[in-house]
Amino acid sequence: MLEADCRDDDWLARRLQELRATYFADVPPGYPIVAQFGIQARYRFGSIMAREGKSLIRVNTLFTDPFVPVFVIDATLAHELVHYAHGFGSGLPRRHANPHRGGVVDRELARRGLKELTEQADAWRREHWEAFYARRCARKLARQSALADAAGRLWEQWLCRPGYRTVDHLRARLVRLGACFGLPADRLPFDVAWLHASLRQKGLSYWFRREKTVRVHGLIADPRVPDAVLDFELAYWLACLTGGTSWPKWQRALQQAGLQNTAEVALRWRGRYWKRFCVQDHPLRSQAG
């Protein structure tokens, strides 16, 4: 594979066609593929979607910089071609319910002889990507940092309101719920904290695996939110981490813990009121305006 001097969309299309012919020749044709440089992101390197009868593969536009090795681009294209082969964004029959779950992409890449390429690209990204991104996107990062600081101040003002739930309250509820699952306070599988949620984060809680922390949306600090809503969010993660993440497993774990009624109350409230809370009471609405 010869690298061209200019990394443009035509160059990208040629690389994709070479990878497709070499490693994916057995995949039946679905929608015709259009490859473009078109996103600039910190954590997303590529994407595939169906649009107007075509498969659009977009690759991080920062990869046009010659500092990024060609094998990183090839690994990104190969990843998206696996999604294409699996029926995501290609018009082909879906081979899996989820595009990534269960390591289906890594297994497919290895089966097609692309494991070494993927590992080489992963190693380069681990060693170089953060510093490269910081250098290329310094102004963007500075703006994001300033916005995050401002958002943090707004959230702290919100969470310090008299009568609102505190982090200590969260932890006390977690200990009480852990006991329902037979877990003593010193063996709980995670800590709990408030999430300074962005306007895009509509979930009521999120699992941060590296921190082993569940962060609960800051709006739930509001005492107008029933205790059952907070309890269900914590109990859901306890059920997933002790019983399993599939619907039948975590639901069975909730039932065994005697929390089925709590779940029903919480889900009813969420269906009726949560969207209104996010629209009317989110502390970042003033920042967005």
Image (spheres, rainbow, N blue to C red):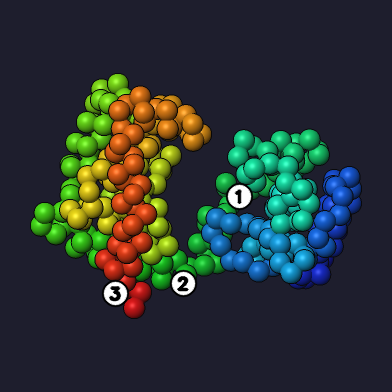
Q: Please, what is the three-letter code of the amino acid marked with disc 3?
A: Ser
Task: Name the residue beneath numbered marker 2.
Answer: 139
Q: Residue at x 87, y 50 (%)?
A: 28
Q: CA distance from mark 2 to mark 3?
A: 23 Å
Compared with 229, 13 (above or below) is below
Q: Secondary structure at mark 3?
A: helix
Q: Is residue 8 visible?
A: yes
Image location (x, y in percent) of residue 114: 77, 41
The amino acid pointed to by label 2 is Arg
Compared to residue 25, the image places residue 281 above or below, namely: below
**Could you tell me which residue is drawn at 37 percent across and 37 percent down?**
236
**Residue 125: assigned label:** 1
- Which residue bears the numbered disc 3? 286
- Residue 150 rendering spot, x and y as whole percentages: 29, 68
Question: Where is 248 relative to 213, above or below?
Answer: above
Q: How many marks?
A: 3
What's under tag 1, amino acid-wise? Arg
